[in-house]
Image (cartoon, rainbow, N blue to C red):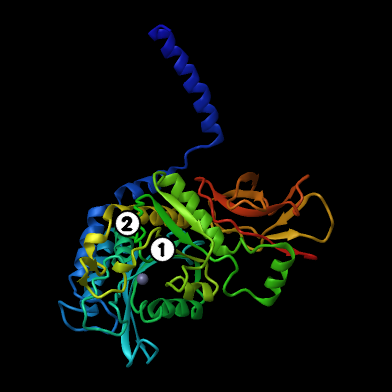
Amino acid sequence: MKLRNLLVHSLILLTTTNLALAQRRTVPVRNRAIANIVREIDARNIEATIRKLVSFGTRNTLSEQNDPKRGIGAARDWLYSEFLKAAEASNGRMTVEKQSFEQQKAARVPQPTMLTNIVATLKGSQPESTDRIYVVSGHYDSMCNSPTDAKCDAPGANDDASGTAAVLEMARVMAKYEFDATIVFMAVAGEEQGLLGSTHFAEEAKKKSWNVDAMLDNDIVGNTLGGNGVRDRSTLRVFSEGVPSNETEAEAATRRSVGGENDSPSRQLARFVKETGKTFVPQFKVMMVYRRDRYGRGGDHIPFLERGYPAVRFTEVNEEFRHQHQNVRVENGVQYGDLPEFVDFAYIANVARVNAASLAALAWAPSRPKGVTILTARLSNDTDLRWDANKEPDLAGYEIVWRDTTSPVWTNSRAVGNVTSFTMKGMSKDNYFFGVRAIDKDGNRSQVTYPRPQGRN
Ligand SMILES: [Zn+2]
């Protein structure tokens, strides 16, 4: 083809395909902002944070609180000042607080001890959404072999300076953006003492009836060479529970009758993260794991789950146990200990990108629809869905999503307009799982709500 013809031809192709695409799917303006957030996350900041946290020698929760150089108190004060610096870009929308409380004697707390969470809150700007809260968290305490040894060196570069550094970097990048809903960036203490800092926060949230719509826990997110010899720099696990920790007897009876063990709010959150990661960090894979946490392990997402808040945990794929909860030592030529030299800073930056994109997508999207029910009063080969109207002024409408009952992710969606009920004609509720999500005028989609049956089960 001659150059001119080629040009004309490609122009026609470009015009027809692009117009069709543009009409079908305008690229939402705010999604460009999410791409910018992802781009601004910098592995060098994450490395600097981890090295600084390691420099405090130990961050055991029982360690020194008033020494400016060594112990958890020094780490606490340094983190507080760093979050304050991050908040400077927010025009007063981000506030930073030391959330302190006295922990009474407990299994791993030999005497009453002050614990402090560092909590940076980026207030949402849309009045209808500002009470909707997304929490992202890492724990800044560390331990060596013994959780009550406050003197040993406990560098905790991976467990969990990695998660803490990711959260601080997110706060630094995201503070200047204005979101509809509120985002809380948090570094907690007392994780190794029994999830104490996160339990305190979750309990306070419950007491104050906060609408925590999702919680993301980052813990052990920096090692890419496993004890099994496998190196994987491009996969991240997201753990989510199937059956809600706070499920009631009535909910359990419904689940036994018509399923739903794969459709808890936390599982929807995991799917949302996976989909968002695929869009904005495509070179990095989010691997869903259908369990609350690994065998014999726990994390800061659990106190949230127990109080009915959707929550997931992020962790690397191949763990190296010689570098977790170990006294720093060389034994038979093998280096033990959670040292920065075993941490992959570029990998943590990608973990932070998946988190940040998910948080931004959640905080710019409308609330997931409430009161979603699937009508079961009549036997029918159609599926009748109903839900309450969202309150956001920029709401565009809703989408019905569905999948085969054996599919791990939502595979189909249909825009149904700004309505509060819809009938999927000729599609039996017995043969698919359905859900509903809200969309705003910029194309931001909420998490999916899985319906409760209304009528007989
Ligand atoms: Zn940990």
Residue 225's label in the rendered image is: 2
Distance between the alpha carbons at the discs numbered 2 and 1? 32 Å
Quarter in which the N terminus is drawn: top left
Q: Earlier in the sequence, mark 2 or mark 1?
A: 1
- Where, by quadrant of the figure, is residue 165 drawn? bottom left
The label nearer to you, 2 versus 1, is 2
The vertical placement of 205 against 289, above or below, is below
Is disc 1 surrounded by few (<14), some (14 to 19) or many (20+) residues within 10 Å? many
As drawn, is 162 to the left or to the right of 406?
left
- What crowding class fits label 2: few (fewer than 14 Cα within 10 Å), some (14-19), or many (20 or more)? some
Q: Secondary structure at mark 2?
A: loop
The answer to whether residue 4 is left or right of residue 345 is right
Residue depicted at x 58% and y 70%:
244
Q: Is residue 160 visible?
A: no
As shown in the figure, which amino acid type bears the numbered disc 2?
Leu
Residue 236 is situated, as x and y percent measured from the top left of the image, at 41, 55
Which residue is labeled 1 in the image? 183
Question: Which amino acid type corresponds to the residue marked 1 in the rendered image?
Answer: Ile
* Image position, residue 340 (x, y; %): 23, 63
299 vs 164, nearest the viewer: 299
Residue 123: give x, y in percent of width and height: 40, 64
Ligand 1 occupies quarter: bottom left
